[in-house]
Amino acid sequence: MSAIVFKIHSDFYYVKNSDGIEFECKMRDVLKKRHVDICVGDFVELSEDKNFIIERKERFNALLRPHVANIDCAVIVCSLKEPELNLIQLNRYLTYLKYFNIEAMVCFNKLDLDTSSHKEINEIYENLGYKTFFTSAKNKSGIHEIKKNIKDKTIVLCGMSGVGKSTLLNALMPYANAKTANVSKGNLKGRHTTRHCEIKEYDDFKIVDTPGFSCLKFDFLLPNELIDLFDDLKVYKNNCKFSDCLHNSKEKGV
Ligand code: GDP
């Protein structure tokens, strides 16, 4: 029987079949010996007694951090205020997702704290092909627009802690009960409140609830590969005089 892994707790894998029936399983030793890695979002095959995972199906994509597989789309949540909008972090998330070939949408949250015009920011990201949303998760505004765009999809919410991911999750899925944390006054960065990865389902969409991850590491990427992740820059790559150029401002003659 086929199933999808929706939660993992130490050695236990919580899976759901196509009828929505849940099972608690362990991984067959033979998979452990082969170092098969199983994460939330993986499609798996179960033993007849449904106690074991005996096979992991091929993934169509997978993220490293958070470690989740088979995602249709990622919504990057940023806050306009508290913490201040951080476009460098947003661009890092976009780059990260592009590397893993995962469609990205951008949600600018806490609109109630910043009612100035966001036309310019919106144009930048929409012109790059990203769908954008402006929300106040706290006041539940802009939520319907997101729901329209994630219909029938399994999505992941990502972004720095304190930007409102858990509040947004609760607004999108009123019964999800994700814990939210007050942004700490000292550095206005917020605190982690989600401790493990879990796929939560609502009418016609699924959300992978993940712990906040504030620091993205690009240790899997060589510096000279980075330009390929920027469509607007890579057109200049072949005009460069030096084949090993990193196209940054420290290098002369680029
Ligand atoms: P997470 O760490 O990204 O999951 O952030 P949380 O959802 O825990 O939110 C951090 C803090 O920001 C909490 O105090 C929330 O009440 C607050 N918050 C979340 N969304 C909004 C919003 O749209 N407007 C305002 N004013 N506060 C928000």
Image (tube, helix red, strand yellow):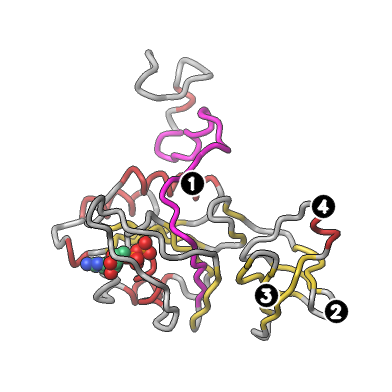
Q: Is mark 3 within 8 Å of ligand 1?
A: no
Q: Position of residue 182 (x, y in %)?
A: 29, 65
Instruction: Identify the mark nearer the N-term, 1 or 4.
Output: 4
Residue position marked by numbered label 1 in the rendering: 96
User: Is residue 66 something one can see in this rendering?
Assistant: yes
Q: Position of residue 55 (x, y in %)?
A: 80, 64
Q: Are marks 1 and 2 in contact (CB under 8 Å)?
A: no
Residue position marked by numbered label 2 in the rendering: 48
Q: Residues within 10 Å of mark 3 (few under 14, many from 20)?
A: many
Instruction: Identify the mark nearer the N-term, 3 or 1.
Output: 3
Q: Residue at x 47, y 33 (%)?
A: 227
Cα–Cα span, label 3 and label 4: 21 Å
The quadrant of the rendering that contains the N terminus is bottom right
Q: Are marks 1 and 4 in contact (CB under 8 Å)?
A: no
Q: Residue at x 82, y 52 (%)?
A: 34
Q: Position of residue 251 (x, y in %)?
A: 39, 17
Instruction: Identify the mark nearer the N-term, 1 or 2.
Output: 2
Residue position marked by numbered label 4 in the rendering: 34
Q: Residues within 10 Å of mark 2 (few under 14, many from 20)?
A: few
**Looking at the image, in which quadrant does ligand 1 appear?**
bottom left
Q: Residues within 10 Å of mark 1 (few under 14, many from 20)?
A: many
Q: Residue at x 52, y 67 (%)?
A: 208
Residue position marked by numbered label 3 in the rendering: 15
